[in-house]
């Protein structure tokens, strides 16, 4: 089984990490649109256009499935992508909502959704969670976390200022949905800042979703991963080596 994994930049590597840990695929083709990241500050039409172009990139690879490892693209472009694709296209929002409902069973819990401006603006998480009966939802666009993570800053003053800027006023949060695949890279810092609350992570959510909803139970000995980027692929590969370490074969 060969999967294409797409994100606007390096964030989707957090999804690749979960896929590699579970050895779910024989081959992963990763594409980061690093020339045009961030998507989260763009409007819907631009996000759709960029996402369709990314899908086009995967055309030559004879894939079995594509995972949109970007909440922003999943929130705004998933139906357009599915319409033009002849293989399954899976986004991260639906798996994230399901993972939340499986992890947080008390509907009165205080759930915080963090994401880019475009993801939060789409209200996709909120609408689905409300339909499931969750009453106490707070959504905050935290787009600054994206360039901070792209810059390789995972701790220290700059990150602490951004955490304070966005989250200072919040109290008694039970769970936070990391509604952007860049955010698991600063998962511990976000959770600690919020008093050690539970985190919902797109990568883990996708794995669970593939297993539970698609009965996908493959387990390959090894996964071959090839990285592509629309700009500076070397930098993306370096980040991948740092972040995925021994999970990569070469
Ligand atoms: N990693 C992407 C997401 O999950 C978005 C980052 C961006 O391009 O703004 O939303």
Image (spheres, rainbow, N blue to C red):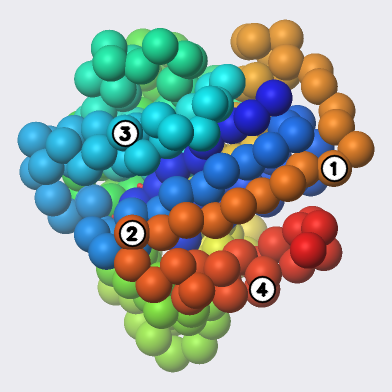
Q: How much space separates mark 3 and mark 2, taking CA atoms?
A: 13 Å
Image-based side of 65 in relation to 22, left or right: left
To which residue does mark 3 refer?
A: 56
Disc with the residue nearer the chain's start (4 vs 3): 3
Image quadrant in which you'd find residue 133: top left
- In front: 125, or 214? 214
Is any atom of residue 118 visible in this view? yes
Q: Name the residue under label 2.
A: 230
| Residue located beneath label 4 in the image | 242
Q: In this view, does 41 lie above or below 18?
A: below
Location of the C terminus (image quadrant): bottom right
Say whether disc 3 or disc 2 marks the residue closer to the N-terminus.
3
Q: Observer-nearest residue: 243 or 112?
A: 243
The residue where tag 1 is placed is 222
In space, the residues marked 4 and 3 are separated at their CA atoms by 28 Å
Q: Is residue 211 above or below residue 125?
A: above
CB atoms of marks 1 and 3 within 8 Å: no
Tell me the residue at 80%/18% (across/down). Answer: 217
Circles 4 and 3: CB atoms closer than 8 Å: no
- Residue 200 in the image, given as x and y percentages of width and height: 57, 41
Mark 1 crowd level (few <14, some 14–19, many ≥20, 10 Å Cα): some
């Amino acid at each position: 089984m060969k999967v294409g994994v797409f994100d606007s930049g390096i964030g989707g590597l957090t999804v690749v990490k979960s896929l590699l840990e579970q050895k779910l695929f024989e081959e992963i083709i990763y594409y980061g649109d690093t020339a045009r990241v961030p998507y989260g500050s763009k409007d819907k039409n631009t996000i759709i256009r960029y996402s369709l172009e990314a899908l086009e990139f995967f055309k030559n690879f004879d894939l079995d499935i594509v995972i949109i490892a970007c909440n922003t693209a999943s929130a705004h472009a998933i139906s357009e992508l599915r319409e033009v694709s002849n293989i399954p296209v899976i986004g991260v929002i639906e798996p994230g909502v399901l993972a939340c409902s499986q992890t947080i069973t008390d509907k009165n819990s205080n759930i915080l959704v963090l994401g880019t401006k475009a993801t939060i603006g789409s209200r996709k998480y909120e609408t689905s969670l409300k339909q499931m009966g969750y009453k106490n939802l707070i959504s905050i666009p935290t787009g600054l976390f994206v360039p901070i993570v792209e810059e390789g800053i995972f701790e220290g003053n700059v990150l602490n200022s951004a955490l304070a800027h966005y989250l200072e006023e919040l109290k008694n949060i039970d769970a936070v949905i990391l509604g952007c695949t860049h955010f698991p890279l600063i998962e511990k810092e976000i959770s600690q800042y919020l008093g050690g609350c539970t985190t919902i992570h797109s990568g883990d959510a996708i794995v669970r979703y593939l297993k539970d909803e698609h009965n996908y139970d493959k387990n390959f000995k090894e996964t071959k991963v090839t990285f592509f980027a629309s700009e500076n692929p070397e930098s993306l590969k370096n980040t991948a080596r740092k972040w995925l370490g021994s999970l990569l074969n070469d």
